[in-house]
Image (cartoon, rainbow, N blue to C red):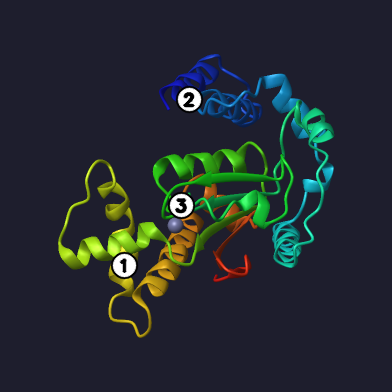
Amino acid sequence: MKRLEQDVDVCESRGAAAEDAPIARRSILKIAIAATAGFAVSPPALAASAKRPPKPENVLSPDSALDRLMKGNARYVEGVSRRHDFKHEREVLSKGQNPFAAILSCADSRIAPEYCFDTAPGDVFVCRVAGNFASDEMVASLEYAIQVLNTPLIMVLGHEACGAVDATIKSIKDGTTLPGHLQSLVTALTPAVDAAQGASGDLLANATLRNIMMNVEKLKGLPPILKAAVDDKKIRVVGGIYKLRSGRVELVT
Ligand SMILES: [Zn+2]
């Protein structure tokens, strides 16, 4: 974020007019975030996408965005997913993107958010990590979607039989440390498992739900970008769980 701070400093040291400064800072913030995050978004493209979103149908309220996600999931469940014209979609999206939902999903290969919501390229901004938890990098990616791409909805998407949650339960139970970098997943998921201990029912299912809900709450309350967007009702943050056999996503928050 050094680049970001430097750019803001430059803006301020130029002595921009007081009423213009916030706008100037915001545009530089957008550009700096895009550059820092490695997104191929140039300033003119950003300005253009703000005026003429490549997918006007993706400019939705948070409630409408959620409704569209769930309708897409219903088509996927019923096996009537839409056929996509990828060639045309690539042309439309070559100038920018305005996804209508951001999804923090587990990396599990069986989930595939683009498929399970029957979406096209440019529709969903998907951040994936085993255990679908909001690490700093995931938060930053979601902030990019909200701040720069004007995405109105975030869904934290967990699933049944999550190996990352299961491994965390076993690691805590056996007192073992996982090899390589795997322990970092255990560390991140331990609070959810701890919170689910002692509840009636299946610990894996309870911890999986708890993990989704805890990350939803974390994102909703995280200043400065996400909390402000939630408070201003510009976005909603919801949780969903993917059922492996049916493919159905059930809302949990
Ligand atoms: Zn998983």
The percent coordinates of residue 114 (x first, y second) are: 66, 49
Mark 3–mark 1 distance (CA, rounded to whole Å): 22 Å
First along the sequence among labels 2 and 1: 2
- Please give the name of the residue rendered at 69% of the width and 56% of the height, measured from the top-left corner: 117
Q: Residue furthest bottom?
A: 200
In the image, which disc is placed on residue 222?
Answer: 3
Mark 3–mark 2 distance (CA, rounded to whole Å): 19 Å
Specify whether 162 is left or right of 18.
left
Image height of 115 relative to 206, above or below:
above
| Circle 2: element type | helix
First along the sequence among labels 3 and 1: 1
Mark 2–mark 1 distance (CA, rounded to whole Å): 36 Å
* Amino acid type at mark 1: Val
| Circle 3: element type | loop
State which mark lies toward you, 3 or 1.
1
| Circle 1: element type | helix
Front residue of 183/212: it is 183
Which residue has dot 1 on it?
Answer: 193
Front residue of 140/81: it is 81
Front residue of 237/186: it is 186
Which residue has dot 2 on it?
Answer: 4
Which quadrant of the render holds ligand 1?
bottom left
